[in-house]
Image (cartoon, rainbow, N blue to C red):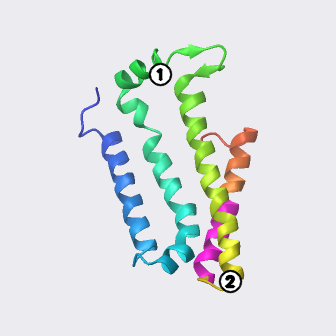
Amino acid sequence: MIAPWQPVVIAATLMLAVSAIVMRILVRPLRREVVISHISLTLETVPAIVVVALSHLPSLFPGAFAKIIGHSIYDYDPSLNGTWLADVWWRSLTIVTLVLFATGFPWAIANMAFGRQFLSNTVAVILFLVWLALAFLGFTGHYSGYL
């Protein structure tokens, strides 16, 4: 078990706190028109922060994850061609994050078409293109790491 004062635990906790603060700032005040016009930027920023925090979760609680999945997160599995941590957990987090990014893109385009918050939605479109380029590099192997 990892002690709560180790750097990984502190970094993961800070990332979750930062994502909550960013989300609160982007959709403040909590009215329908504000949420609709800013949700695209929220979908392009918050998942990137949350995925970094969640990527360390199995390493923080390896015993709990071993009970859930029935083996160690570090065991090599030939059918996965790697470990559960790298091939299942990180790949799943990446796919969920990319789906959220892809959801924010058409929402930003629609908001710009309706004339809502043009600047923030333009930033959301640019962020989507950056995430898409990073994902392409990650899936082709020219970039080591994940989002």
- Residue 114, numbered circle: 2
Nearer to me, 59 or 144: 59
Q: Is residue 11 left or right of residue 33?
A: left
Residue with the mark numbered 1: 73
Where does residue 74 sit, x and y in percent of width and height?
49, 20
Total labels: the figure holds 2
Residue range (magenta): 118-130
Where does residue 139 sit, x and y in percent of width and height?
72, 40
Mark 2 lies on a secondary structure that is: loop
Q: To which quarter of the image does residue 133 belong? A: bottom right
Where does residue 110 sit, x and y in percent of width and height?
69, 74
Badge 1 density bin: few <14, some 14–19, many ≥20, Cα 10 Å: many
Sequence order check, earlier mark of 2 and 1: 1
Q: Which amino acid lies under the numbered mark 1 shown in the image of this protein?
A: Ile
Badge 2 density bin: few <14, some 14–19, many ≥20, Cα 10 Å: few
Q: Is residue 31 left or right of residue 79?
A: left
At 65% from the left edge and 20% from the top edge, which residue is drawn?
80
Q: Which amino acid lies under the numbered mark 2 shown in the image of this protein?
A: Phe
At 63% from the left edge and 43% from the top edge, which residue is drawn?
95
